[in-house]
Amino acid sequence: MTSSSEIRLSCRNIWKVYGREPERYFKDDAATHDPKALIGKMRDEGAIPAAANVSFDVGVGEIFVIMGLSGSGKSTVVRCLSRLVDPTHGEVVLDGEDLLAKSDKDMIQVRRHKIGMVFQNFGLMPHLSVYENIAFPLSLQGTTPADAKPRVDKVIDLVGLQGREKSYPHQLSGGQQQRVGIARSLAVDPDLWLLDEPFSALDPLIRRQMQDEFLRIQNDLHKSIVFITHDFLEALRVADRMMIMRGGEVVQTGTPAELITNPADDYVAEFTNDVPLVRVLCAHEVIDADAVPDEGRPCVPAQTPVEMLLPMLAAHPEGVAVERAGTVEGIVTAQSVISALARLSDQDDAKAEATA
Ligand SMILES: Nc1ncnc2c1ncn2[C@@H]1O[C@H](COP(=O)(O)OP(=O)(O)OP(=O)(O)O)[C@@H](O)[C@H]1O
């Protein structure tokens, strides 16, 4: 799953069905026996399975991306996690606690203390300054202004908004407003960080900068993250693992490289078609199986994208070592990269011929 195998969030068979008395679909075990048939029945009867039998885990420190076209159910799933939308059926377990068993009052506390949320439209309060917007979730928790100050200052620092504390949202650019949104969501130091299309409203250059900022912040904080996007390239940049949705259902879950090299169907392949392999393959996926690890080589983390390895391989034709958690997993050479790319391109060609 991720470098850490500890699971923070576990979602099991989540359903959100809109329509008349949706609970009636779960009176027997039809959902367990044949979810596809149940989805068909719901649709025939005019109900909308906005999330249908969705299961996934998010590890401690993992960035889990949910991707899909508009209307595929991404926002519904994320709202089910914090129970902004109540799932019709299923299980959401955060740090061992079943969130669906909690009262509305207890859920307010969970949202205030354990979950941070960032929205596409920033969701800032226009009449509050940057500082006040960021301090707001702490005041909801009952933290005194004096106790809140060091924390607010810290997250303002983290997102690079020093000097803008007294500005109001309308005085800020889109990128700056989203920095406030990010800082506010981090003020309470949440265990689970939910980001719903956080950069979609920003123009491409700023968007890219914000993705870098986001990764830098995550590198410091190691949050457990669910990140929604409909942009596959954005997903590739940020995801440890990703889940592709269509019509409320999960089509495929895996690492970016797994999805690209082995798409479950044409819908997934459509997203992945034009993505260069060097951007998604990581060092540990292009190891030279015959090379024996030895001392004295430059070392890169297992998750280093091949794109970043290429200049190193040009400078070190003898190869570089690949390490994970302090242990060398193997050696990557220019030849092993070329072989891996050739093998995967051949597989792609074979698939294209088979479907032609
Ligand atoms: N309150 C509601 N009542 C009825 N149908 C709803 C409701 N909310 C969402 N839906 C339907 O559920 C489906 C999934 O919607 P959702 O907003 O989760 O999709 P999405 O993938 O997040 O889309 P987008 O990228 O456009 O935000 C859609 O068909 C939508 O019309």
Image: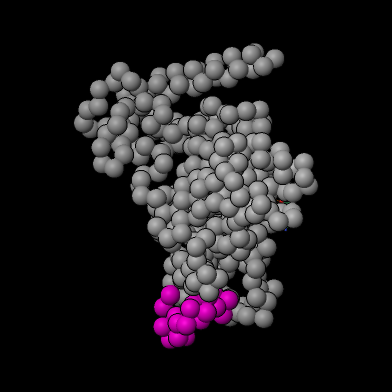
Farthest front residue? 28
Question: Which residues fall within the magenta stretch?
Answer: 132-151
Task: Residue 76: tell me if it is visible.
Answer: no
Q: Nearer the viewer, residue 219 or 229?
A: 229
Is residue 141 found inside the magenta-colored segment of the image? yes
Q: Nearer the viewer, residue 51 or 241?
A: 51
The quarter of the rendered structure image containing the N terminus is: top left
Q: Position of residue 274 (x, y in %)?
A: 64, 30
Q: Is residue 27 above or below residue 145?
A: above
Q: Is residue 299 left or right of residue 262?
A: left
Is residue 97 found inside the magenta-colored segment of the image? no
Q: Position of residue 74 (x, y in %)?
A: 63, 49
Q: Position of residue 278 (x, y in %)?
A: 51, 30
Task: Residue 327: tell me if it is visible.
Answer: yes
Q: Nearer the viewer, residue 69 or 91?
A: 91
The part of the image, by quadrant, that contains residue 68 is top right
Farthest left residue? 295
Exactly how many numbered labels are in the figure?
Answer: 0
* Residue sitting at x 50%, y 45%: 56
Q: Is residue 156 above or below residue 215?
A: below
* Residue sitting at x 54%, y 15%: 346
Q: Is residue 262 left or right of residue 94?
A: right
* Residue sitting at x 50%, y 37%: 254
Q: Position of residue 3 (x, y in %)?
A: 36, 44
* Residue sitting at x 62%, y 33%: 268
Colouring chosen for the image of the structure? one colour
The part of the image, by quadrant, that contains residue 167 is bottom right
Q: Is residue 245 left or right of residue 65?
A: right
Magenta residues, dominant SS class: helix
